Image (tube, rainbow, N blue to C red):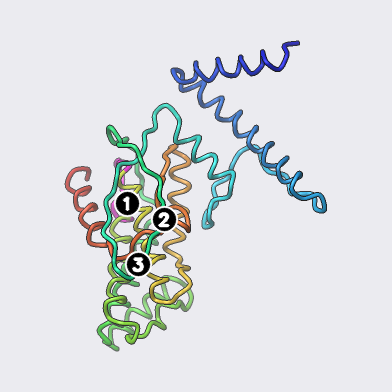
Amino acid sequence: MPDQDQIIQSARTLIQQAKQDPSLARDLLHLAHEIIGMHLNLSAQDSSEARKPDPIPASPTIPGFAEPDELDDLMDHFYATMPSQSAPSVVLETHHTDFHLPDSRPEPRIEPKPDIYPLQPDDILAGVINRCTTKGKLIEAIAEADQTLIEQYARELRNLEGRYTWHQELNPRLGQEKLLNMAQNYFVLADVARYLNRTGTTVRHALELAAEAQSAVRSASLELGESGDDSDQRAMFGWLKAYTSQHRVFLSRHMRLNDPANPYNHQDRRRQLNDLLHFHA
């Protein structure tokens, strides 16, 4: 039976071979899932003698509407290092004076060329389009104190959501600027979802823009003093996690609570979306 040094050397040899063999790389990735799951399980046992932890599965699952767990984060890193992957392009942002982003952020590498991914119409995206459009119109009406339109769009939103939501309680005294900014973030998220909700293909940039748009909706909600919880932000987040897992795409920005998008950059996101529509429609 080979000793430990021989086993480690064999593993390193396989890793080198996998750099030229995508099929072998995928097999090693599945093995890495099992090793990391075992490691996290053992770590949990070491840190808590009083309570036996729940077993951690060997393969990660993608949550529909929840923040990713530790194993998901590690798997994202592995997917990012697969042979066909490259890092996202640099996106420049202008910051509003009242909105503060974390000081430290990862420095991405320049992406040599966009990857192409398939698209098909999706019920989740269709719901995001309809609800976000109505939410934007409702909040615009609240900003303008137009009671007739407020009542109209509030009814539409209740029908779409199937329940009463916090959007109908927004007060014009919050300030017209913040309200109109919130509305624009909903409109941008609706239009990004509309771009993705079609038969054809898309590029990595579109997925990055969707991640930024859904995060900006949450940030804008927090600016209004709300909890940040929004059905469409969660729906787009869940769709992105499932889609990027299926196609092995790594999104390094705006998919974590501690990496919020600037809600005052909606005009730049609109410009980027127009560029996508022009070049990749």
Residue located 56% across and 25% down the image? 28
Marks 1 and 2, how far apart at CA = 20 Å
First in sequence, mark 2 or 3: give its number.
3
First in sequence, mark 3 or 1: give its number.
3
Relative to 44, does residue 130 appear above or below in the rendering?
Answer: below
Q: Say whether residue 196 is magenta.
A: yes
Viewer-closest of 258 and 131 = 258
Circle 2: residue type: Asp
Residue located 36% across and 85% down the image? 171
Mark 3 — residue?
99
Q: Looking at this rendering, what residue extends furthest in the front direction?
A: 103
Question: In the structure shown, which secondary structural element does the residue marked by tag 1 occupy?
Answer: helix
| Quadrant (top left, top right, bottom left, bottom right) of the N terminus | top right
- Residue 145 sits in quarter: bottom left
* Camera sees residue 187: no
Q: Indicate which disc residue 209 carries.
A: 1
Left or right of residue 2: residue 188: left
User: Magenta residues, as a range?
Assistant: 193-204
Q: Position of residue 173 (x, y in %)?
A: 33, 87
Q: Say whether residue 197 is magenta.
A: yes
| Quadrant (top left, top right, bottom left, bottom right) of the C terminus | top left
Mark 2 — residue?
123
Task: Please name which of the two marks, 3 or 1, marks the residue nearer to the observer.
Answer: 3
Q: Position of residue 51 (x, y in %)?
A: 80, 53
Residue located 30% across and 37% down the image? 110
- Residue 94 sits in quarter: bottom left
